[in-house]
Amino acid sequence: MREVVDPVNPLGLKAPFKELFSVVQRNGALQAYAFQCGKLKGLYLLPIDGTGLFYSGTCRCDDCCIKNEGKKNETFYHNIMGSCIVHPSRKTVIPLAPEAIFRQDGSTKNNCEKAAIRRFLAQAKHDHPRLKLLILLDGLYADNPTIALIREYGWHYIIVAKDGNHVSLIEAMNALYDEGQVHHHKIVDEKNNTTHKFRYANNVPLNLQDETERFNALDYIEIDKKGIQHVWCWVTDLELTDDTVESVMRGGRCRWRIENETFNTLKNQGYQLEHNYGHGEKHLATNFAYLTFLAFLVDQIQEFSCPKFQQALNKSKKPTRKRLWRKITSFFLTLMIDSWDSLFKAIACGAKAQKIAFDTS
């Protein structure tokens, strides 16, 4: 199989993602992920980020990125850019086709990811031209070119702003504060004993350049029941008012879903995304990563839409995907399975014990 998969162009493995996404749309399941912010309705939150797949000092292929090229500590690695449609009230996610990061994208991590995100956004617009996306990004992408590209595609964005990377933003916010253009809002959640404090301003310059992008800036502090403060800051093109800041906050915090519900699941819950199943000479490692994401998409669709899958997954008192995968493997190795329905029903309800049948032929 490795010899067959290695030369396959990874672009060909993106088509099934679009086809499965279309199935979700046609059946109306996507509506459950629709997000509203003020007067804007029917938005879909899409966090995007990169993650590592493989790291070696000796094994390499045509797709490998190279660190410390030509030096004694030269190493080879694979990174991939992933994304998924999320919603604050839903645990399941809907991953879109990932974008592999190649050596040709640059010699540093930041350059590679910025080149890859341009390809990813272009592919997403091509595959889903009518989808109203609200892009969620890390502070690495809070720059003029990325923001301009998102606006060109007709989408919206919420991007993390970090103090160390955006000194001019802090200066601009301080100047607006002195002019009385910074607003404050507080929400007290008595049920959860939590306080939410917001400080926001609209039409803030990203940096000191004359033709820089302008956006709206939101500082947010959550004071939990123990009195501990948690601080976030975002830039967005969504209008900020007392009525919208909470929605923007909820949306912005969903960026972590790409880490927790996607990358963490793929690496630690039985998918073994970082496992080297075979590196190959051309695209084997990249293609295996794409196929792993595709399997994850199928499972996520089943998890939010298939009652039998849900019953099988939640059979245990402490349900985990690893347990379900082990159960499926066990049944496949010992029983004749005529359908997925039968398999999930057997796991959920239990299967009768059978005597061992010996092959005496």
Image (tube, helix red, strand yellow):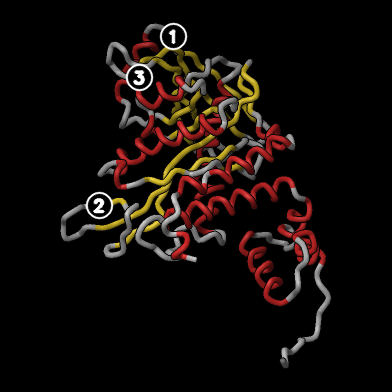
Q: Is residue 143 left or right of residue 121?
A: left
Q: Residue at x 43, y 31 (%)?
A: 160
- Going from N to C along the chain, the mark reached first, 2 or 3, is 2
Give residue 86's position: percent from left, percent from top: 60, 37
Q: CA distance from mark 2 to mark 3?
A: 31 Å
Give residue 81's position: percent from left, percent from top: 44, 43
Q: Which residue is mark 3?
A: 206
Q: Which residue is mark 2?
A: 67
Q: Quadrant of the C terminus?
A: bottom right
- Label at residue 181: 1
Q: Residue at x 59, y 54 (%)?
A: 295
Query: Image quadrant of residue 104?
Result: top left
Q: Amino acid at mark 3?
A: Leu
Q: Is residue 152 left or right of residue 77?
A: right
User: The residue tagged with tag 1: helix, strand or loop?
Assistant: loop
Foreground residue among 245 and 19: 19
Q: Residue at x 61, y 43 (%)?
A: 93
